Image (cartoon, grey):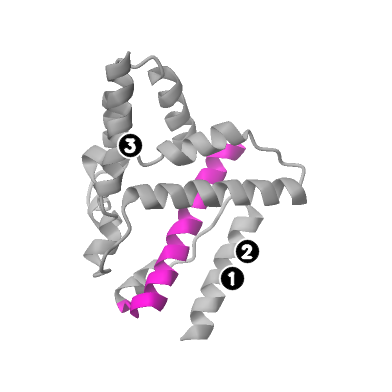
Amino acid sequence: MTNSILNLLLSGNQLKRTARGGWVMRGVPNAEDVAAHSYGVAWTAMLLANQISLETNVQFDMARLLSMALIHDIPEGLTTDIPSPAWKLMPTGAKEDVERGVMAQIVEGNAQSDQLMELWEEMHGRQTAESKLVHDADKVEMYLQAWQYERQFGNQQLNEFWEKEHQFHFELSQSIYAEIRSKRTSAK
């Protein structure tokens, strides 16, 4: 039992050494790692959930929400963070299929494997409020980071992130994204 939990811990720990490939390929120096991104997604998801709950009658299961946010990129410890231009060249669904297989491999033989796979599948199904909010938080965090890198380094290789407007599941997420875009535009 100790060994199977140790293997899960090692999989999460690997994310500290796995650079976010999209930033690296676009020339961002000292790009964040996947663990930093996952923390940002969890932080963003928690704040969004709390605010949405205050403003609407939507209530979130915070344990499920934060668990999904924390595991959403665990497979990247083995696959690395392959940038979207590479995945776009692959058949539809290939990225999710590969990550599902890797996730199953990571959790195999652990007493928590069913629970972790259920959370991972729920997140990818985008049917529950929690899974939709994790997807929103993932994108809000990414756009926030892109904007910060542009401001910090003047990196113009990130313009492609802003070419197509993103549609979010929750109004608050959409509003924050619009505010980031607005601040980015007015700063130029």
Q: As rendered, which of 147 and 167 lies closer to the eye?
A: 147
- Which kind of residue does numbered mark 2 sit on? Ser
- The x, y position of residue 125, in whole percent, is 48, 34
Q: Which residue is under mark 2?
A: 175
Tell me, for residue 86, which label it has, or none.
none
Q: As rendered, which of 125 and 179 lies closer to the eye?
A: 179
| Residue 178 position (above or below residue 76) | below
Helix, strand or loop for disc 3: helix
Mark-to-mark CA distance, 1 and 2: 6 Å
Mark-to-mark CA distance, 1 and 3: 32 Å
- Give the magenta part as a residue range: 129-156
Q: As rendered, which of 55 and 132 lies closer to the eye?
A: 55
Q: Which residue is under mark 3?
A: 12
Q: Earlier in the sequence, mark 1 or mark 3?
A: 3
Is 37 left, or right, of 169 in this rendering? Answer: left
Number of marks in the image?
3
Residue at the image position 25 percent from the left and 50 percent from the top: 82
- Which kind of residue does numbered mark 3 sit on? Gly
- The x, y position of residue 46, in whole percent, is 59, 46
Q: Earlier in the sequence, mark 3 or mark 2?
A: 3
Q: How crowded is mark 3: few (under 14 residues within 10 Å), some or many (20 or more)?
A: many
- Quadrant hosting residue 153: bottom left
Which numbered disc, 1 or 3, marks the residue closer to the eye?
3
- Which kind of residue does numbered mark 1 sit on? Glu
Residue at the image position 36 percent from the left and 42 percent from the top: 73
Q: Which residue is under mark 1?
A: 179
Residue furthest to the front in view is: 2
